[in-house]
Amino acid sequence: MRISKEFTFDSAHFLKDYHGKCENLHGHTYRMRVTIEGDMQANGLVMDFAELKRIVNEKVVDVWDHANINDTLEHASVENMCVWAWDQLKPELPNLTEIRIWETANSFAIYDGR
Ligand SMILES: [Zn+2]
């Protein structure tokens, strides 16, 4: 069984070594989906959504919301953001399965640790 929770945050970024719209500092409302996998427990839950929310907010969203992603990552692409978020969350969520981050409604990256 898999469960997911979605988060949104507003952040600034620019892309280094890139020529196009995203080379200058600007903002996005990012959307992130965190998915974990596990057996349903006797209480009918894989994991308490409130606990999942607490961990993801503390480790990732609170760092990036209303901040410049380039303060965390030299190359502030959604691809690198997925890897960074994975590295922050995996120790807290051993059954983390997938992270998706949308930069726009139609453009996103998916990372599953590989
Ligand atoms: Zn951008």
Image: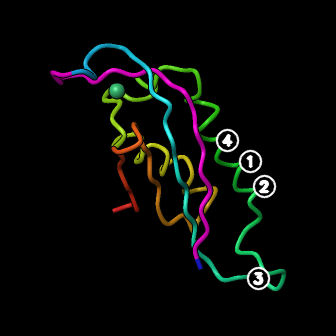
Mark 3 highlights which residue? Answer: 41
Locate the C terminus and report the quarter of the image it occupies: bottom left
Tag shown at residue 57: 4
Mark 1 highlights which residue? Answer: 54
Pointer 2: residues within 10 angstroms few (<14), some, or many (20+)?
few
Instruction: Determine the CA span between mark 4 and mark 1.
Output: 5 Å
Residue at point 74% right, 60% down? 49
Q: Is residue 3 magenta?
A: yes
Residue furthest top as drawn? 24
Residue type (three-letter) at the residue carrying disc 2? Ala
29 displayed left or right of 110: right
Q: Is the C-beta separation of discs 2 and 1 under 8 Å? A: yes
State which tag comes first along the sequence, 3 or 2.
3
Q: Residue 30, percent across and down?
A: 49, 36
Instruction: Determine the CA span between mark 3 and mark 1.
Output: 20 Å
Q: Secondary structure at mark 3?
A: loop
State which tag comes first along the sequence, 2 or 4.
2
Bounds of the magenta segment = 2-20
